[in-house]
Image (tube, helix red, strand yellow):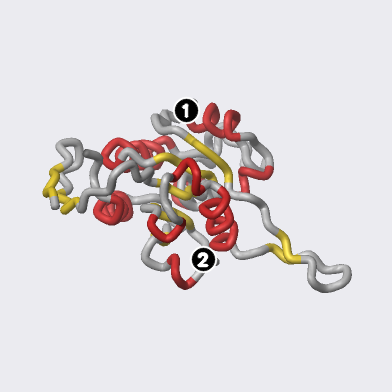
């Protein structure tokens, strides 16, 4: 066991040595990196809120908070947001970098659909899409799915019951906050 203090954020974390474990942040964008307070503050500026997944619709202060989490934990990002339906990993990396993002996006969760009933297509809960990503990426994670250290930052709650400890609900009114980042750092542990 090692006790580590992150100089950048002052978080004290007890680390149980985990060799070669990649840490993952499953990231939603709407409600996390943009939020109602931010939209209200932008109403007089040139932000076209009519366009879905507009590149200008990201709050740079929330990106800074995400950067802090990444810097302290060494985590990589997987996009679980609906933005993944309109952009590639490379495009999302560029969009976020334009807003000051310093991390690395390593993937997108799959878009799963349930088509069990005739003429109806239902969305599958996001927790299932996260589980599918973890299952199909065991090779790069160097671990079993159940042992992967990850957090889910999302303003929706359609996660699986066994993901509840990994899920950090973000209030879409104010977006990502220092309190959520603090909790996520303690959960993931600081970088060695």
Q: How many numbered marks appear?
A: 2
> Residue drawn at (13%, 48%), measured in percent from left and top?
2
Q: Quadrant of residue 87?
A: top right
Relative height, residue 74 to residue 165 (above, below): above
Image spot of residue 80 (x, y percent):
55, 50
Q: For mark 2, what is the residue?
A: 159
Question: Residue visible at 32% across and 38% down?
Answer: 74
The residue lying at 50 percent from left, 44 percent from top is 139
* 50 to the left or right of 177: right
Q: Please identify the quadrant where the C terminus is shown.
A: top left
Q: Quadrant of residue 123?
A: bottom right
**Residue 44 placed where, x, y %?**
53, 37
Distance Cα–Cα, label 2 vs label 1 = 28 Å
Q: Nearer the viewer, mark 2 or mark 1?
A: 2
Residue 78 falls left or right of residue 185 = right
Q: Residue 161 location in percent, x, y?
A: 47, 72
Q: Secondary structure at mark 2?
A: loop
Q: Secondary structure at mark 1?
A: helix
Q: Which residue is mark 1?
A: 97
């Amino acid at each position: 066991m090692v006790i580590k203090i992150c100089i950048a954020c002052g978080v004290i974390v007890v680390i149980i040595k985990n060799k070669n474990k990649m840490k993952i942040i499953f990231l939603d964008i709407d409600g996390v990196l943009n939020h109602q307070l931010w939209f209200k503050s932008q109403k007089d500026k040139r932000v076209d809120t009519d366009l879905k997944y507009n590149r200008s619709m990201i709050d740079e202060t929330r990106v800074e908070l995400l950067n802090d989490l990444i810097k302290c934990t060494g985590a990589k990002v997987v996009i679980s947001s609906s933005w993944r339906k309109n952009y590639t990993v490379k495009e999302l990396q560029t969009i976020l970098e334009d807003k000051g993002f310093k991390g690395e996006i390593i993937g997108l969760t799959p878009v799963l659909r349930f088509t069990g009933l005739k003429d109806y297509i239902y969305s599958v809960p996001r927790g299932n899409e996260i589980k599918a990503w973890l299952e199909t990426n065991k090779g790069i994670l160097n671990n079993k799915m159940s042992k992967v250290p990850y957090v889910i930052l999302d303003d929706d709650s359609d996660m699986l019951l066994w993901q509840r400890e990994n899920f950090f609900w973000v209030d879409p009114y104010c977006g990502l906050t220092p309190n959520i980042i603090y909790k996520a750092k303690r959960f993931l542990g600081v970088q060695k």
